[in-house]
Amino acid sequence: PVAGLIGLWAGNAFLNWQRTRRTERFINQLPELARILANATQAGLALRTAIGMAAEELEAPAGEELGRVADRLAVGHSIEESLGELTERLPSRELVVLVSTLVLSARAGGALVGSLRNLTVTLEQRKETRREIRTQLSQVTVTAYLVPAIGLGSLLLVDMMMPGALDRMTGAFIGQTAVVIALGLFTLGFVLIRRLSKIDV
């Protein structure tokens, strides 16, 4: 049962990591997306056409996601509805700001090109800030993974130096309790370090 729970937790953690990684890649593409939309609208193209053009020019995941938006626009869905679904699939503050700018411009008109160009500069600055923070926290991230690895490595090292020591230790109730408590403390340390090093920009 414990192994099954660990397997479920590991699978869920892997899926969340992949989802977060894909969202991060999309966020990094937002400045280029805003630039393409600004150039297209400045050239006189409609926003629907500009989104389709951006879907063709950008790589995945932005190209794939915009392709889905363009497909929904092509079958009659509104810009607000199509872009709203995009923000639900890839939640991020930067995307919400971009979508709000596009939706408001589609509703009420206004200087869309100027807004997109200003937004491009802002997104570039946020992208650079996020990169600097990630670099500064890389040592803390490595520490979070090293703490449990050192604990497990110590157990294996003791068993190699004294063959059978691990079996004797886990053969008694006190030893089993000590191992469970140690694993819990290492897990708690990992979670706390990860929480402390998580900075929302």
Image (cartoon, rainbow, N blue to C red):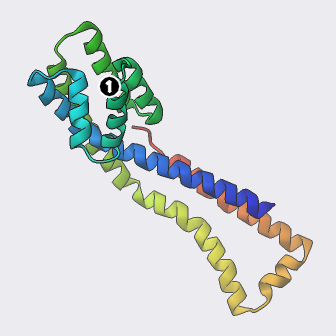
Residue 92 visible in image:
yes
Q: Nearer the viewer, residue 67 or 121?
A: 67
Identify whether 5 is placed above or below 54.
below
Instruction: Give the x, y percent position of residue 71.
Output: 35, 31
Residue found at the very far top of the displayed protein = 108
Q: Is the C terminus in the top left, top right, bottom left or bottom right quadrant?
A: top left
Identify whether 59 is placed above or below 168.
above
Instruction: Give the x, y percent position of residue 178.
Output: 81, 68
Q: Residue at x 48, y 46 (%)?
A: 19
Residue found at the very far front of the displayed protein = 75
- The amino acid pointed to by label 1 is Ala
Q: Is the N terminus in the top left, top right, bottom left or bottom right quadrant?
A: bottom right
Instruction: Give the x, y percent position of residue 69.
Output: 35, 30
Residue tagged 1: 74
Q: Residue at x 25, y 24 (%)?
A: 48
Decide if residue 11 is on the left or right side of residue 68: right
Residue found at the very far left of the displayed protein = 43
Q: Residue at x 8, y 25 (%)?
A: 43
Q: Residue at x 28, y 37 (%)?
A: 30
Instruction: Give the x, y percent position of residue 7.
Output: 68, 60
Q: Residues within 10 Å of mark 1 (few under 14, many from 20)?
A: few
Decide if residue 131 is on the left or right side of residue 140: left
Residue 125 visible in image:
no
Q: Quadrant of residue 61?
A: top left
Decide if residue 116 is on the left or right side of residue 107: left
Decide if residue 25 is on the left or right side of residue 167: left
Q: Nearer the viewer, residue 165 or 41?
A: 41
Identify whether 14 is placed above or below 56.
below
Identify whether 74 is placed above or below 171.
above
